[in-house]
Amino acid sequence: MMGLYLSLKFFVLGIFTRCFAKHKTLVRSNVGLSRATTIGVLYSYDSPAKHEVVQRFIRDLKNLDKNVSVLCYTTGKDRVHPSSRLRYAFGHHAITILGKVKSDRIKKFIETPFDYLFQLDLTTNSVLDCLVAKQRAKCRVGHFDPMRKNLFEVMVKVSRTAPIEDTKRLASQMLHYTGCMEG
């Protein structure tokens, strides 16, 4: 029964997000990664290996003297590795079927005017897509998907081989391309 509810929730949330993204008009700009100060990172927890790739990406941003805020979407079936320290995790219950956010931490994340918002997932996720659509970042960066072109100002395409290697390439190319951009 819960599986049917979640399927329906993700379907309706996806429709809501597409409509919201099409009609929301925010002025977006590119400040260039070298001048960016605040960075948001969104991802879904799939495995300890992916989590480590994302943590390395966050460390790389912090080594560039960036202020990084992170949110991680998890499901009930996810087994979080004991050393992962997911202080910033949330589940599907933090957002309603119509996209209303219930968590103060997530509301604060959405309202933060990041210079860049990176979404480090290779597949679509209705919950994270909704947060990306509502986020006020100057430049939103994600994996290339023609169905999500209204969500991102910069989309990076990686060839698909092994999921962890794909995520590593995605993170690396996101840093490379945003590093090449100047405002």
Image (cartoon, rainbow, N blue to C red):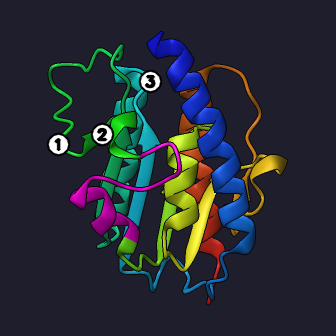
Residue 158 place in picture, x, y as percent:
73, 40
| Residue furthest to the top | 1
Residue 20 is left or right of residue 44, and the answer is right
Give the residue drawn at x 48%, y 9%.
Answer: 1
The residue beneath circle 3 is 46
Give the residue drawn at x 72%, y 73%.
Answer: 23
* Numbered disc 3: secondary structure: loop
Q: Nearer the viewer, residue 149 or 103?
A: 103
> Label 2, label 3: how many angstroms apart (C-alpha)?
13 Å
Q: Residue 173: say if magenta.
A: no
- Can residue 29 be seen in this snapshot? no
The residue beneath circle 2 is 90
Residue 175 place in picture, x, y as percent:
54, 60
* Numbered disc 1: secondary structure: loop
Q: Is residue 57 above or below residue 139?
A: above
Q: Residues within 10 Å of mark 3 (few under 14, many from 20)?
A: some
Residue 120 is left or right of residue 53, and the answer is right
Q: Nearer the viewer, residue 53 or 107?
A: 107
Region of the chain picked out in magenta, as a range: 96-110
The residue beneath circle 1 is 87
Report the amino acid beneath label 3: Asp
Mark toward the viewer: 2 or 1 = 2
Q: Is residue 39 above or below residue 99?
A: below
Report the amino acid beneath label 2: Phe
Report the amino acid beneath label 1: Arg
Residue 44 place in picture, x, y as percent:
44, 35
